Amino acid sequence: MYLSQLKEGGVICRRGDDARRVLNATSTYALAQEAIAAGTSLAAVIETHGLGDAVDLHALAAAGKLDCPVRHPDPAHMHLTGTGLTHLGSAATRDAMHAKAKSGDEEQLTDSMKMFRMGLEGGKPAAGQEGVQPEWFYKGTGVAAVASGDALESPAFALDGGEEPEIAGFYVIGADGKPYRLGFTVANEFSDHVTERINYLYLAHSKLRPASFGAELLIGELPDDIQGTSRILRNGEVLWQKPFLSGEANMSHTIANLEHHHFKYALFRQPGDLHVHMFGTATLSFADGIRVEEGDVFEIDAPQLGLPLRNPLQRGERPATEVVGL
């Protein structure tokens, strides 16, 4: 089952090729709150609401009428975060970006390689045990969440704006302070890799960018092996493309371990808040020497997660940052 959120309000449920509007549903967030309050599942709540006439989901997507699959009514209560160095193929790319001379102890490892090795050794703990914590980063609030089809804006001060094809999990915090997982979607964790490469301590700066999310939310368990394609289009032609792998079969951490280390903080268990957590990638066009230009289109297609995610790149205007004293 997949859920989509209409920008004008309303929710669409798709099973196979059959997409229908959920009756009397204003938003996916509202449906999730109903499910939490009733102690039941999203699927059960949708069954209770019932489904209306069939809709053409592809036509709605092409017309730009589909939003991110879940939004909080107050963007300040929607938190975008993520983890890195979680995929089996991710270390080489990050290590090359952060490479530096090391000396001293028994091994000559960059901090990136050390973190990656920690994940390999302790990222998949046995049930009931706590694994090693991953790299973690903050992206922003709901104002940084971009729908498929809308532009990803790279700030005027940015040195780069590159794609990162990822899986994102959506979570609502219940009145009891517990996180409830709604489902998963494909994401573009848009970042400034040139800034990050200058010094890995600039990672926090490089991540303060928008991120885009696929129009469909997969309800239920995440497949162990997610296979997709990430590509960049320039003037309608493919400039670059590469397959990417995700899911636990291709990761050094379990989803449960990544969730635990995010939600262990009380700050992230405030009732009513919506969390969107991205689980990392191993595939970057930047690693292949690609420099994107305004107007280029990022396309991330992972059929197991629904419709492809497409966003054109747009350059932002230089902001007014002068602080005015009162």
Image (spheres, rainbow, N blue to C red):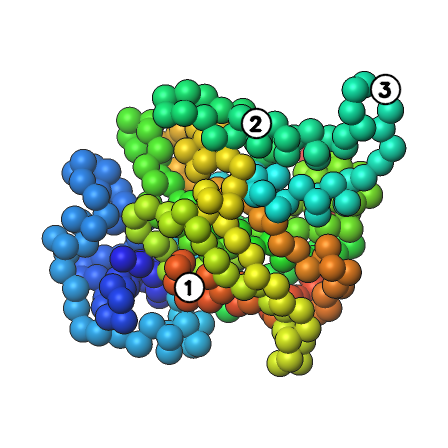
In the image, what residue occupies the spot 37% across and 75% down?
Answer: 58
Residue 165 placement, left or right of 14: right
Indicate the position of residue 110 as horizontal and vertical percent values.
76, 32
- Classify 10 Å Cα crowding around label 1: few (below 14), some (14-19), many (20 and above): few
From this viewpoint, is residue 75 visible? Answer: no
Residue labelled with disc 1: 303
Indicate the position of residue 198 as horizontal and vertical percent values.
82, 43
Residue 58 placement, left or right of 283: left
**The C terminus, quarter of image:** top right
Residue labelled with disc 3: 104
State the residue in front, 24 or 193.
Answer: 193
State the residue in front, 49 or 310.
Answer: 310
Label at residue 121: 2
Q: To which quarter of the image does residue 297 belong?
A: bottom right
Residue 129's place in the image compared with 326, above or below, is: above
Q: To which quarter of the image does residue 252 belong?
A: top right
Indicate the position of residue 4 as horizontal and vertical percent values.
34, 61
Indicate the position of residue 80 as horizontal and vertical percent values.
51, 43
Residue 30's place in the image compared with 290, above or below, is: above
Q: Give the alpha-carbon distance from disc 1 to disc 2, as whole Å.
A: 31 Å
Q: Amino acid at mark 3?
A: Gly
Label at residue 253: none
Report the mark closest to the observer, 1 or 2: 2
Residue found at the very far bottom of the displayed protein: 236
Q: Give the alpha-carbon distance from disc 3 to disc 1, as whole Å.
A: 47 Å
From this viewpoint, is residue 54 visible? Answer: yes
- Label 1: which secondary element: helix
**The N terminus, quarter of image:** bottom left
Q: Amino acid at mark 2?
A: Glu
Q: Give the alpha-carbon distance from disc 2 to disc 3, as whole Å.
A: 23 Å
